[in-house]
Amino acid sequence: MDKNELLLQLGERVKEIRVQKGLTQTELANKIGKDHPSINKLENGKVNPSYYFLYEVAQGLGVDIKDLIA
């Protein structure tokens, strides 16, 4: 699997969990002190996030970081 496929897979997983939690991209962004485009780029595989950014996203979603990459 190449880098782009992995980033898309990560983004799809984040979106899946976010939707399950009933959050919009804007709501998640506000919870973690980010802007809406940051979440949008993550979910669309357009950014290679840092570990800390993934940690923040996981915290905002109320899941463990490992759940984002499962």
Image: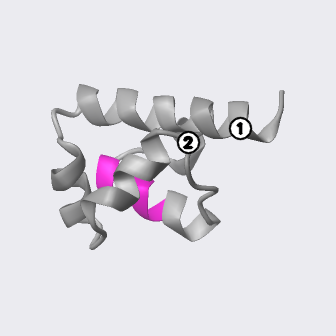
Q: Is residue 27 above or below residue 66?
A: below
Question: Residue at (32%, 48%) from the top-left corner?
Answer: 62
Camera-side residue: 18 or 44? 44
Q: Amino acid at mark 1?
A: Asn
Q: Is residue 60 magenta?
A: yes
- Tell me if 26 is positioned left or right of 41 in this view: left
Secondary structure character of the magenta stretch overall: helix
Question: Residue at (32%, 47%) from the top-left corner?
Answer: 61
CB atoms of marks 2 and 1 within 8 Å:
yes
- Tell me if 42 is positioned left or right of 52 in this view: left
- Quadrant assignment, res 14: top left
Tell me residue 54's x, y (percent): 52, 57
Question: Residue at (36%, 48%) from the top-left corner?
Answer: 40
Magenta residues span 55-61
Q: Kindly identify which residue carries mark 2.
A: 45
Tell me residue 44's x, y (percent): 47, 39
